Image (cartoon, helix red, strand yellow):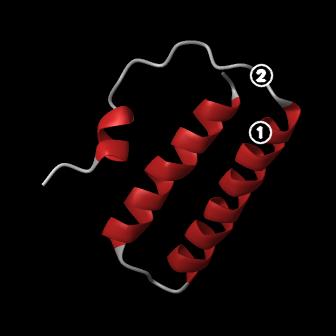
Amino acid sequence: MKIPHLDLAREPVSAPPHHPSLSRWLETQSRVVELWIERLVGDGGDPRTIAVLQQHAAFLREAGEL
């Protein structure tokens, strides 16, 4: 089964319009994910979950720099 929104993530991204609210939201989301990473690492959380969250945080940071 294909999920349409996941297929969109694989398409090349042309320069999206810069919007300050979007940049702030991406930065906030990145910080929230990083806080969860710190908490999970401190609590001995599942390494696979931590790795996925690290990838997600990197994606959010990269998206905020576009």
- Report the residue at 35% width, 23% height from top: 11
Q: Quadrant of residue 52?
A: bottom left
Residue 12 spot, x, y in % from top left: 40, 18
- Relative side of 41 to 4, left or right: right
User: In which quadrant is the N terminus drawn?
Assistant: bottom left
- Relative side of 64 to 9, left or right: right
Residue 55 spot, x, y in % from top left: 45, 48
Residue 15 spot, x, y in % from top left: 61, 13
Q: Quadrant of residue 64?
A: top right
Q: Quadrant of residue 35?
A: bottom right
- For the image, the number of numbered tags is 2
**Farthest residue, direction right:** 20
Residue 10 spot, x, y in % from top left: 32, 30
Q: Nearer the viewer, residue 42 or 16?
A: 16
- Report the residue at 49% width, 54% height from top: 54
Crowd band around label 1 with a 10 angstrom C-alpha radius: few (<14), some (14–19), many (20+): few
Q: Nearer the viewer, residue 25 or 42?
A: 25
Crowd band around label 2 with a 10 angstrom C-alpha radius: few (<14), some (14–19), many (20+): few
In the displayed structure, 26 sits above or below 11; it is: below
Which residue is the site of mark 1? Answer: 22
In the displayed structure, 65 sits above or below 45; it is: above
User: In the structure shown, which secondary structural element does the residue marked by tag 2 occupy?
Assistant: loop
| C-alpha distance separating marks 1 and 2 | 8 Å
User: In the structure shown, which secondary structural element does the residue marked by tag 1 occupy?
Assistant: helix
Query: Three-letter amino acid code at disc 1?
Result: Leu
- Asked if labels 2 and 1 touch by Cβ distance under 8 angstroms, the answer is yes
Residue 18, numbered label: 2
Residue 56, numbered label: none
Q: Nearer the viewer, residue 23 or 30?
A: 23
User: In which quadrant is the C terminus drawn?
Assistant: top right
- Relative side of 35 to 10, left or right: right
